């Protein structure tokens, strides 16, 4: 009995001692708090000083900080803090016509919304979305594709195989806008952007720097008739025009700036991103860049928690480089360069691309 009493007394005394310690050092204990690790595995860290001298390290990756900076910049420009003004900045989402929402692809299975921007790796991202949503069937297996690299690019060029916001009316009827709002609120929304001038060069190289009858009929032949200084009618085929080398980047820029071109910037391969993806209304959770697409893609797939299911397809060679801008714009008169910048100024400002002073003020 004596041993049990001694043990009981020892436990009581120990408890009282710990209580006294807590009371004496309460201020220091109360001031100590563990911060969450924002990005596991990051090599970068910040230190937080405490009264007790304890340093709590908080890991914040460069990619996380960069994303916050990109999103904040969009918010600032959309709120009018920047000097640039552009159509649709202050309108509400419900004021956007359905026809202008065709670039917002929805994957309900993984709760993802992707706004595709032509000439910004959108073919590869559409392949990723096709695999995630299981919306495309492989003819060889009869099952949905599981590897983006297996999907032919021609199958994803158009958005017909995807479920987009513009199709919500067919599925949800009068509740379509309500469903859009719900998905915008709860789904992860992302897009990828690119330097606007580099994107224009890429669009010209792709659509007019090779044989493309569709774009020649719709735009190339018009450019030649207006600005080609031809003695007769332009060639009937893009093959003839390409062989003659008579379609130029200057004609393309003249077409974009021509008051007779209606509507302005009328193809999504060179439409401004703010017109395609409505960043002021959608509120994107992730903004990737073409210039950092490999690291951004890796970060995004982890964010979506699908990195164990899929990898971003490797990019093709012969990509348009930013270093080519000076050479390509050498044939464009300075005044036209400045007018073109004003046309795309909102995209430069929204997505943090520096004003190309070396091109505008050589």
Image: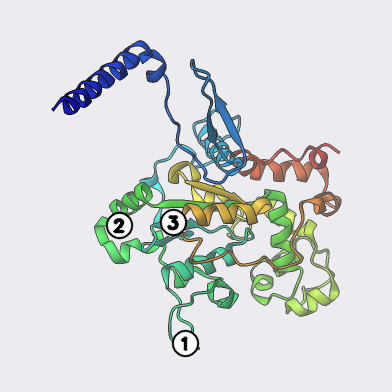
On screen, residue 173 versus residue 86, left or right, reads left
- Residue 240 lies in what quarter of the image? bottom right
Q: Is residue 165 visible?
A: yes
Residue bearing mark 3 = 113
For label 1, the crowd category at 10 Å Cα-Cα, with few meaning under 14, some 14 to 19 and many 20 or more, is few
Residue 287 x %, y %: 55, 47
Which of marks 3 and 1 precedes in the sequence? Answer: 3
Residue bearing mark 2 = 176
Residue bearing mark 1 = 141
Indicate whether 304 appears above or below 218: above
- Give me the residue at 77% from left, 45% from top: 336
For label 3, the crowd category at 10 Å Cα-Cα, with few meaning under 14, some 14 to 19 and many 20 or more, is many
Which of marks 2 and 3 precedes in the sequence? Answer: 3
Q: Residue furthest bottom?
A: 140
On screen, residue 151 versus residue 185, left or right, reads right
- Give me the residue at 75% from left, 41% from top: 338
Indicate the quadrant containing the N terminus: top left, top right, bottom left or bottom right: top left
Residue 229 x %, y %: 83, 63
Label 2, label 1: how far apart the Cα atoms are: 34 Å
Q: Residue furthest top?
A: 24
Indicate whether 348 appears above or below 15: below
Label 1, label 3: how far apart the Cα atoms are: 27 Å
Residue 277 x %, y %: 50, 51
Residue 305 x %, y %: 45, 57
**Residue 168 versus residue 187: which sits nearer the camera?**
187
Q: Secondary structure at mark 2?
A: helix
Which of marks 1 and 2 precedes in the sequence? Answer: 1
- Give me the residue at 77% from left, 77% from top: 235
């Amino acid at each position: 009995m004596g041993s049990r009493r001694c043990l009981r007394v020892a436990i009581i005394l120990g408890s009282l001692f710990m209580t006294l310690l807590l009371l004496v050092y309460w201020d220091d204990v109360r001031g100590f708090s563990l911060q969450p690790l924002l990005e596991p595995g990051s090599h970068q860290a910040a230190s937080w000083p405490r009264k007790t001298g304890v340093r709590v390290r908080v890991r914040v990756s460069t990619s996380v900080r960069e994303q916050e900076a990109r999103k904040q910049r969009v918010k600032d420009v959309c709120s009018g803090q920047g000097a640039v003004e552009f159509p649709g900045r202050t309108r509400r989402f419900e004021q956007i016509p359905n026809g202008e929402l065709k670039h917002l692809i929805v994957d309900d299975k993984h709760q993802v919304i992707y706004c595709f921007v032509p000439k910004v790796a959108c073919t590869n991202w559409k392949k990723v979305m096709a695999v995630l949503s299981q919306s495309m069937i492989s003819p060889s297996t009869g099952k949905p594709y599981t590897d983006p690299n297996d999907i032919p690019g021609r199958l994803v060029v158009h958005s017909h195989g995807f479920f987009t916001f513009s199709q919500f009316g067919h599925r949800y009827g009068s509740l379509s806008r309500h469903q859009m709002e719900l998905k915008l609120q709860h789904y992860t929304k992302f897009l990828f952007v690119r330097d606007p001038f580099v994107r224009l060069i890429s669009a010209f190289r792709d659509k007019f720097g090779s044989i493309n009858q569709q774009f020649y009929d719709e735009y190339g032949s018009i450019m030649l008739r207006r600005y080609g200084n031809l003695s007769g009618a332009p060639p009937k085929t893009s093959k003839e025009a390409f062989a003659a080398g008579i379609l130029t980047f200057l004609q393309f820029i003249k077409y974009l700036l021509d008051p007779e071109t209606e509507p302005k910037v009328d193809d999504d391969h060179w439409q401004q991103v703010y017109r395609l993806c409505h960043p002021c209304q959608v509120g994107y959770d992730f903004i990737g860049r073409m210039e950092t697409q490999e690291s951004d893609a890796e970060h995004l797939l982890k964010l979506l928690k699908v990195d164990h299911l899929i990898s971003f397809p490797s990019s093709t060679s012969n990509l348009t480089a930013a270093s080519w801008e000076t050479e390509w714009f050498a044939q464009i008169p300075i005044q036209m360069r400045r007018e073109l910048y004003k046309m795309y100024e909102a995209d430069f400002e929204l997505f943090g691309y520096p004003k190309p002073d070396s091109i505008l003020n050589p």
